[in-house]
Image (cartoon, rainbow, N blue to C red):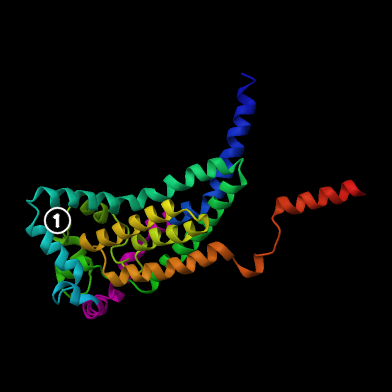
Amino acid sequence: MLLAIPAALWAWRIGRQFFIDWAPLFAFWMVYDRLRLVQPFLLERVAVKTPYLIELWAFGWMAGGEVPAHAARTWLAAHSSVPVWAAAWWAAQLIYLSHVAILPMLFLPWWWKGRRDETYRSRFTQHMRGFFALHLLGISIYLLLPVAPPWWVGLYGMAQPSAELLAQTKMSAAMDGIIVQNLIQNASHWFAAVPSLHGAYPVLLLLLSLKDRSRLKTGLLFIYAAAMWVTTVVLNQHYIVDLLAGAVIAVIAWWFARNGLPFLRNKPRKDERDQVLLRSAAGD
């Protein structure tokens, strides 16, 4: 029974540290989920026609005068009976879904090893700082500039989103793939197309990996980024311009991850200040 006391104290201490260290990610998940409460107030401001026209102007040449997302969906639907393309369709959905799990899968071992290894601690802290900046930029833009994804245009044309249209939307008519349909149906904000966090996540991970000077790691992340970008377009979830906007905020977040806030850059951490005070006291 007595062993339960130190065990409880250890669990409380490590649990508290876990929640403190992971607070930026938890906060993003909670705020993003609560966007469903804000979405009804944003419908009148959703940009539908302009992003479509920009995409058509910039990348219509790639798909015979159509936006690539619509053309890709049409082509794959026509070849869905071919086994290799049917398998590719499922693979695309799993790649798209990996966006949900990629951060916990990477961050958890870094955090655990970082409790005793400063290298892993530094890696965890830098990545968390970068993704905090990325999420802050993303949420701010979603609220300031809601944008309709290509599946909305494919389903309703240039119609302005309304509560009535949202209520009657059938995801099976807007996009293909049961996994993606369920994911979007339960999404908290249907008009958070710009910037694409699906496009931003792998770009930021790729940029943060450059300092490791590992060709293997950088190569794998580049392949993952390319696969995610292709997947989001093929699944009719994003325009290419959405992905480019995601890459832009990923670069900004990467800078923040490396540099932090200028006025805090040279400020010593609390544990460093404590060590300096202890050494001064010992000298006296």
Q: Is residue 245 left or right of residue 76?
A: right
In this view, 48 is above or below 123: below
Coordinates of residue 226 in the picture (x, y in percent): 31, 60
Magenta segment boundaries in residue numbering = 29-58
Which residue shows up at 48% across the image and 47% down it? 107
Q: In terms of secondary structure, what is the magenta stretch mainly? A: helix
The answer to whether residue 41 is visible is no
Closer to the camera, 158 or 180?
180
In this view, 54 is above or below 81: below
Residue occupied by mark 1: 172
Q: Is residue 30 magenta?
A: yes
Coordinates of residue 130 in the picture (x, y in percent): 50, 60
Image quadrant where residue 245 sits: bottom left
| Mark 1 residue crowding within 10 angstroms, few (<14) / some (14–19) / many (20+) | few
Q: Is residue 9 magenta?
A: no
Mark 1: secondary structure: helix
Report the residue that reaches farthest toward the front.
Answer: 215
Image quadrant where residue 165 sits: bottom left
Which residue shows up at 31% across the image and 76% down it? 45
